[in-house]
Image: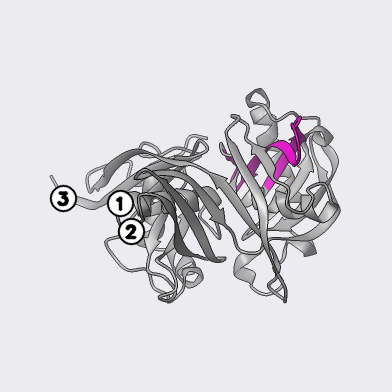
Amino acid sequence: MKAALWEIETFDYHAGGEPFRIVPALPFLIEGSTAIERREHAKVGDADNIRKLLVNEPRGHADMYGGFVVPPNDPGAHFGALFWHREGFSTVCGHGTMALGTWAVRSGLVRAPDDGETDVVIDAPSGRVTARVRMIDGKVGDVAFHNVPSYVVDRDIEVKTADFGRLRVDLAWSGALYASLPAASAGLEVTPSNLAKVVAAGHQVAAGLVNHSAAHHPADTRLEGVFGTIFHEPMKQKGAGLAQRNVSVFADGQVDRSPSGSGTAARVALLSDSGELAEGEVLDHYSIIDSHFTARVVDRVTGPDGGLVVEVSGRAFPVGEGKFTLDADDELGLGFVLR
């Protein structure tokens, strides 16, 4: 029997129920000096084949998410990350940043005190992000994702869909471009029983925005395109702040089980801009499975790359460790996706 082509070590986590498969080391270096350059090179060749191997069945599933740990852009970060999913490589991943920060501290890659906060600084393709890990009695408590600046791109864009009529969406940038709309406007509720319709609506909204001028990044074509569609609905909130439930349909029809890290940042940008989320207030954000993140604005950045620095807080947990192989005699090769 021929030897295995690869043996890939992974550490699997989840944040808010959304999986994140961490690959701490690849058997080769991905070309490029920055995360965004490496993302471009990773789209072809062995890096993309390993992505497919880890996403596809029988080793993964249609809604798998993960990331490669790569060198940082410069000594100002602990490491870089290339985030991937079924369709390819994303520009940012909030729940993945939470998972990576937790993993980095738990593994000892980044040293942390038994009590207090430690920043794990990560270079993502969309920019430098931080996972602020809070330690309590030697254990990881919550982790706060500090995103790149988020801002409103456009509002009230009409999108024609085949099955849901004419919908109106708002666009916000949060390291990736998200379209947001009330679930009720598409005749939907954010519940698991509506999942098939939610996925169909997300597909149709994203398709309807492909050629829209607002979907083009003003400075870097590598960052353009609508990554996800967020359907949201109000929830009752006790006291100050705001509570909403949402579901994000991203990439090629994948469904975020978490409230979405970067998607939550996009929602905060829109809600702050409209005045629905007052300065200093917290957004309690729930997912389609009722997992929970909180989010708030922690800073405002001026200038051409300015916007709101949003902190999204939650928890990430390890779910397993593994070594995935591809045997040279395996006729299924890199695997398959049924859905």
Q: Residues within 10 Å of mark 2 (few under 14, many from 20)?
A: few
Decide whether residue 7 is among the magenta residues.
no
Instruction: Determine the residue positioned at 33% across, 49% down.
Output: 106
Q: Which residue is mark 3?
A: 3
2 vs 1, front mark: 2
Picture coordinates of residue 62, whole percent (x, y): 49, 39
Q: Identify the residue under disc 1.
A: 107
Q: Residues within 10 Å of mark 1 (few under 14, many from 20)?
A: few
**Which quadrant would residue 222 be assigned to in this image?**
bottom right
Mark 2, residue position? 111
Could you say where residue 15 lies in the image, as x and y percent from the top left?
49, 41
Which region of the structure is painted magenta? 229-256
Q: Is residue 245 magenta?
A: yes
Helix, strand or loop at mark 2 = loop
Q: Amino acid at mark 1?
A: Ser
Disc 1 + disc 3, Cβ < 8 Å: no
Q: Which mark is residue 117?
A: none
Give the SS element for disc 3.
loop
The amino acid sitting under disc 2 is: Arg
